[in-house]
Structures are given as structure tokens and as C-alpha cells.
Amino acid sequence: MIRLTSMAFAALFAATWPAVGADEHDHASKHGGVIVEAGHHHLEVVARDGVLEVYVEGEDGKPENVTGAKATAAVLSEGRKIDVQLAPEGTNVLKGSGPFRAGRGTLIVLTLTMPDHDPEQARIKLD
């Protein structure tokens, strides 16, 4: 029976694990929004008073085609809940509007269903 000390195990683990950062991509905001992960997608949520835009990227950081995608957002602002339907507005953009203010403390609960995927959910709190 082979016994590994914790030092030997750590060395073996480090040697066989892929390098950290080897396949990472840029998580910086490209549109002035908040970046969140939801299931298999990275989302950038841009909220302005009355308007939500959601930019959808795959796990690889490349834009995802949102044709056929469905999305809703529950916007909790100033003590009210406003439901917003989002629709494709470009290759990887979903957009919707409603009577809400996008100020500090606003909470957005976004549900996204991409074609051939299970629904994904993200929560965003605006600073």
C-alpha cells in the first residue's frame, strides 16, 4: 500500500492540476454594468432608471446568441417590486423596461432561459 505524506500529496496535486488562470477570460465590465455568473453563462447587467440590458456570454467569454432566449427580472426598488420582461435586442443582448428606479440598494433577480438550457438565475444588488 502506498502512503503519501501531506507534502507529497500536495506536490502531486499541484503537478497534475491545470495552471490557475490558464483558461480564464476577462471578467471586467464592458458596458458599465455588474458582472454575475448564472449557470453556464456570464451576464453583464446594465440598469438605468426604467431600463435593463443584459449582455450574455458563455463560459468561454464569447458572446452567446440570445435568439430564442427568455428572460424576466424582478426589480425591487423603493419598496416596490416591478416585473420586467426582457427580449432579444441584438446578438447577445436582452433588453426590457418598466417603471423602476435603478438606485443604490436596488435588487434585481434575473431569470434566464437559453434555448436547450435549464433556467438560470442571478441576483444583483446595485451599489
Image: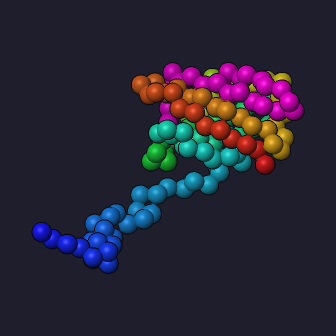
| Residue 87, image quadrant | top right
Establish if 15 lies above or below 124: below
**Residue 116: image location, x then y, percent:** 41, 25
Of the pair 114 and 62, the residue shown nearer to us: 114
The structure residue drawn at horizontal position 32% and vertical position 64%, both measured from the top left corner, is 17
**Residue 77: image location, x then y, percent:** 82, 33
The structure residue drawn at horizontal position 29% and vertical position 72%, both measured from the top left corner, is 9
**Residue 127: image location, x then y, percent:** 78, 49
Question: What's the magenta bit mostly, secondary-structure-wise?
Answer: strand
> In the image as oriented, which residue stretches furthest toward the right?
78
Image side of residue 105 versus residue 65, left or right:
right
The structure residue drawn at horizontal position 42% and vertical position 65%, both measured from the top left corner, is 20
Quadrant of the image for the N terminus?
A: bottom left
Asked if the magenta segment contains residue 72, the reply would be: yes
Image side of residue 24 versus residue 56, left or right:
left
Of the pair 60 and 75, the residue shown nearer to us: 75
Of the pair 90 and 60, the residue shown nearer to us: 60
Establish if 56 lies above or below 74: below
Q: Is residue 90 visible?
A: no
Q: Which residues are magenta?
A: 64-86
